[in-house]
Amino acid sequence: MQKKQKIIIGVCTVLCVGIIGAGVFFARNKEKGNKEEIAYVMSVSSMNNMAGTQKLAGVVESQKTLDIQKDTEREVKEVLVKTGDEVDVGTPLFTYDTEKLDTELQQANLDLERAGNDIENQKAQVAQLEKEKKNASEKDKLSYTTQIQSAQMDLKKSEYEKKAKEVEINRLKNQIENSTVTSEMKGVVKSVNNSANGESMNPYDGSQQAFMTILATGEYRIKGKVNEQNITQIVEGAPAIIRSRVDKDAVWRGTYTAVDTKNPNNNSNEGMMFGSGQDQQMTSTSYPFYVDLESSEGLLLGQHVYIEQDMGLEEREAGIWLDEAFIADVDKKPYVWVESRKGTLEKKTVVLGTYDENMMQYKIESGLKSSDYVAYPQDFFKEGVKTTHEMPENMMGMPEGDGAIPEGDMEMPEGEMIPEEGQEPEASVSEGEAAVE
């Protein structure tokens, strides 16, 4: 549990810094010698929603994938399945053409028979030469010895050729008998490469692509994609929540794997985050990551889902929660700066409840409504200071004096996107994957 809390705290840090960074912005406009102070305020409801609703598109895929390569020296006669077909162990997938093998087998049998005849003749020849050598003169025995040795060499050569033909015949018979390739596992046919009879090459690394790919059924994982702007949000080992796109009550839990930076994808339609009122399409390189599930019960292969960071918000009490940085005088008489109906700041006393260490937030028992707007407390704040919901272009940094924060500390984290409530992103899926909602 302690390890999980540390991971959550690390994941939440970027988010919290973004909230605070946005909250501390203010401007002082000088016109005709008059100085105007404006406080930037944020919606309480948006701060309660942003942590739990940032979504990445995901798709359910098999935990195990079987790539089947065809024999490059053989031709495929017939493909017996198509993409999307369900297969079991032993299901015929495709067959090889055996016409050429049948011809080679016939020739090999003839060669084997010829080698057998040669062996018999050479054995008889050696026996005849040895018999004649016994009755030969001493002068002729040397010649017979030479002839016998030559005949014995020819015999060994023929015996070797016979064994080689027997091995070849067994190979040909085995190929003919196993000309139908069957599935080694239960699953679904993901793809069939019919281009150039399956001899397609990967354009990225030159490797041969699988002739057929089968996804195992039963054990699933979730595949998502991120790019350079949001890659830091995926922390290996951190908990994740998977949500159905059509059933808000359908939830699965899992753990993030490391981002696979070795297999980039330059498709600009993938690696998207959703929010800020519109989809934020990333045109930069995207990288895959996976979520290993505690249970995949109820998921369908190819189903589109949402992936969220598990901040522990599912288990905590319902109500209004506020970042501790927005609460002043926490230990004595806590209060927050709230926007009044007049569009100015006013001080409001609040009653604090449970403290969430992971999110660094307090539950507000009373004194604040979700419809309120609050400002990050500053030393120069006083009741009556004008407020704004929009961040003017000249709000680039803090003024000199107490409470000033360097310009670099006030920038929103790169890739941080705050989705609006009710935003419905569309998931992306790789080519060849069936979409199931």
Image: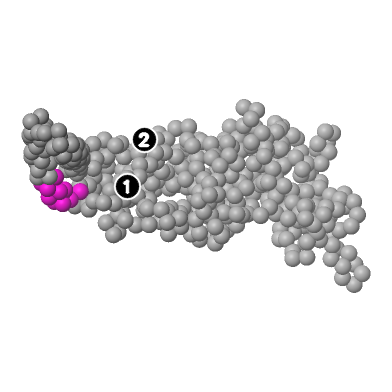
Q: Which mark is residue 377?
A: none
The residue lying toward the viewer, choosing from 307 and 326, is 307
Image side of residue 194 versus residue 333, left or right: left
Which numbered mark, 2 or 1, is in the foreground of this view? 1
Q: Position of residue 309 (x, y in %)?
A: 57, 41
| Residue 54 at x, y percent in the picture | 57, 48
State which tag comes first along the sequence, 2 or 1: 1
**Residue located at (62% from left, 47% from top):** 232
Location of residue 341 by image quarter: bottom right
Quick check: is 101 in the magenta stretch?
yes
Quadrant housing the N terminus: top right
Q: Residue at x 31, y 56 (%)?
A: 199
Confirm whether residue 271 shows in the render.
no
Closest to the observer: 411 or 232?
232
Q: Which residue is mark 2?
A: 218
Q: Are marks 2 and 1 in contact (CB under 8 Å)?
A: no
Tell me if 100 is positioned left or right of 322 in this view: left
Q: Seen in the image, is 378 located left or right of residue 214? A: right
The reply, left or right, for residue 395 in relation to residue 44 is right
Q: Residue at the spot x=22%, y=47% of the render?
A: 94
Q: Report helix, strand or loop for mark 1.
A: loop
**Residue in the foreground of this view, choosing between 321 and 403:** 403
Residue 343 place in picture, x, y as percent: 76, 57
| Residue 326 visible from this viewpoint | yes
Q: Amino acid at mark 1?
A: Gln
Q: Quadrant of residue 182?
A: top left
How far is the residue under mark 2 from the one under mark 1?
24 Å
Chain part drawn in magenta:
96-109
* Amino acid on which the number 2 mark rests in the picture: Gly
Residue pointed to by mark 1: 69
- Residue appearing at x 64%, y 36% in the figure: 7
Task: Tell me if residue 406 is in the magenta stretch.
Answer: no
